Amino acid sequence: MSAKDEVNITRGMQNYIDTNAEYLAKRQEYIEKTVKNWKFDTIAVHGLYSVTDALEDYQGAIIEPIFMSSSQAYRDSDEMAAALAYKIPTWCYSRIANPSTYYYEWTLALLEGYGFEGTTSCCSTSSGMAAIMTAVQPFLQVQNSVTEERNFVATAQCYGGTFQQFSVRLMQERGIECRWVKDATNLDEWAEKIDNNTRFLYGELPSNPQLGFFDIEKVADLAHSHNLPLICDSTVATPALLRPICHGADIVVQSVTKSLASSGFGICGAVIARKNLVTNIDDEQLKEDFSLSVKYLQNRDFGPNLHPVQAIMALNDMRTIRSKMDLMSRNTEKVAAYLDTHPKVESVDYLGLKNHPHHELASRYMWLVDAEHDDFYRKPVNRYGHLMSFCVKGGATATRKVFDNLERIWRATDLGRIKSVATIPAISTHQQQGEEGRSLAGIPANMIRLCVGGEHPDDIIADLEQALKRSG
Ligand SMILES: *Cc1c(COP(=O)(O)O)cnc(C)c1O
C-alpha cells in the first residue's frame, strides 16, 4: 500500500524500508507455509499472533496485546517519513491502524478466506453499519462529472439499518439510486436492474430477519459479466457456516457485533475483500487490495475506526466460533421444530426446516466448516445458524402478549448472542422504515424474531411454552 502522492525516498528512509522488507517477507512465509495449512479452528484460536511475536515484541504475553495508545513514536525523521508514506509497516495513529486491531483484522481475513484459492484482507470498522458504508462508498465516487447518474442494486430483504443507509442517506440525501430486488432468487430481476450507471450489486444472506437467500455463484457471475463487484452481508451465517468469497463474491461485510462476538460486549464490524476484485471504477490500488486501500486512505479521512479493547474482546469470542455456531444451530433446529407444530403459531421461518422455501438453496451453501475433519461428524454437515422467526396467530396484540410473557428469553433488539434474545421487528429494528418499507421487506406485525443461544434448548422451549400458554 502506498499513499497517493509519491514521496522522495531518502537514504535513511531506504534503510528502514530494507529492514522492514525482511520482516514482511518472513511474515508472508509464515502465512503461506504455516497459517494457511491450519484448519479453521486453529486459525480462529491463533490468527496471526505467534509465539515469536509474543516473545520478541510483547514480553511473552499469550493473549494479543491491547494497545490503548493514540499514536506510535518513531526513532527519527526518516522512520517517520517512511511510515507516514506507508512504505513500512506502521500504525502511526490509532485512527489509521493499531496493533490490536491488526490481529483482529488478520483473523477475520483468514477465516472469511478459508478455502479460497486467492488472498483476502480485512479492514476493521467501529460497527457493522460503518462496514457497509466503508464497503459501498468507494464505488460511488464521481468518475466523470458531478451530475452523472449512479445506481446500485440491492436485496430488499435486508437489515433495517442497511435499508435506512441506502434509502435515506444515499438515495434521498445524495441522489444515488438504490434499485431494490424484491425476489433475490430471481436472477432476471437482478439482471434487468443493471445498466451502464450501476456501480455494484449488494446482497444480504441469510437476511435479517426474513432469512432471504440467493444463489451467490449466479449473482456473482452476473455482477462480473457487467464488470461489477458483488458485496455480501454475511453477518447471520458467519464464516463458520458460509464464506461468500469462496463462491465468487468480491467483498463481505460483517457486523462482528453479532454471532462472531456472541458475548455481547459491544459493537464492531469488518470489511473483508478478495485481492484483485472486479469493478468498473478506475483505481488500481482499490482493485488490487480493496481492504487496505479503504483502511489507509478512505477511512483515514472518514475515521470509523474500531477501538483496540473492542477488537480484542471480539477476537476472544471468535476463537470458538465454529463450535458455537454448531451448538446454537442445533438448538435452533430443535426450537423451530417445536414451534412449527404449535397450535398458536401461524408460521415458522427457519432455513433448517424442510418446508422453508429456501431450504434447498441454503443447503447448497450453508455447511459447518470442517465437519468432515471433525471426529464426531466425519462428513459434511449442513447448519443453518441461530436466527429464526415465527408469526403468532391473532395479530399484533396477541404477538405482543406472547412476547411480554417471555421470562428466560431476553426482549432486546439484538441477535447472535450466547443468550437467547427475541424482538418484534415491526416495532424495533424495522420500525424506522414505515409500513411501506416493511411490506417491501416482508415484515408482518405479528412476527417475532428469535435468536436461540447456547442454553439447553429444552429450557428455551419451556419458556416459549409458558409464554404461548399464558397469552390466552
Ligand atoms: C446488526 C446488523 C448490521 C449492523 O451492524 P452494527 O454492528 O449493529 O452496526 C448489519 N447487517 C446485519 C445483517 C445485522 O444484523
Image (spheres, grey):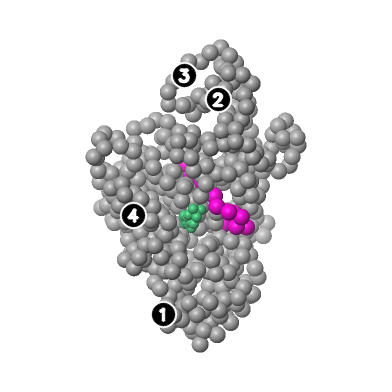
Residue occupying the point 47% across, 70% down: 424
Query: Residue 63: horizontal and vertical position, in percent?
Result: 71, 43
Horizontally, residue 373 falls left or right of residue 211, namely right
Q: What's drawn in magenta, residue-wise?
A: 259-275
CA gap, disc 1 to disc 4?
28 Å
Label 3 amino acid? Val
CA gap, disc 1 to disc 3?
66 Å
- Give the numbered dot on residue 7: 3
- Give the numbered dot on residue 395: 1
CA gap, disc 1 to disc 2?
61 Å
Label 4 amino acid? Ser
Horizontally, residue 197 falls left or right of residue 81, namely left
Horizontally, residue 136 falls left or right of residue 90, namely left
CA gap, disc 2 to disc 3?
12 Å
Element type at mark 3: loop
Query: Residue 130: horizontal and vertical position, in percent?
Result: 47, 47
CA gap, disc 2 to disc 4?
39 Å
Crowd band around label 3 with a 10 angstrom C-alpha radius: few (<14), some (14–19), many (20+): few
Query: Residue 238: horizontal and vertical position, in percent?
Result: 53, 54
Label 2 amino acid? Ala
Q: Is residue 471 above or below residue 40?
A: below
Q: Closer to the N terminus: mark 2 or mark 3? A: 3
Q: Is residue 284 above or below residue 156?
A: above
Q: Closer to the N terminus: mark 1 or mark 3? A: 3
Q: Closer to the N terminus: mark 1 or mark 4? A: 4
- Give the numbered dot on residue 83: 2
CB under 8 Å between discs 1 and 4: no
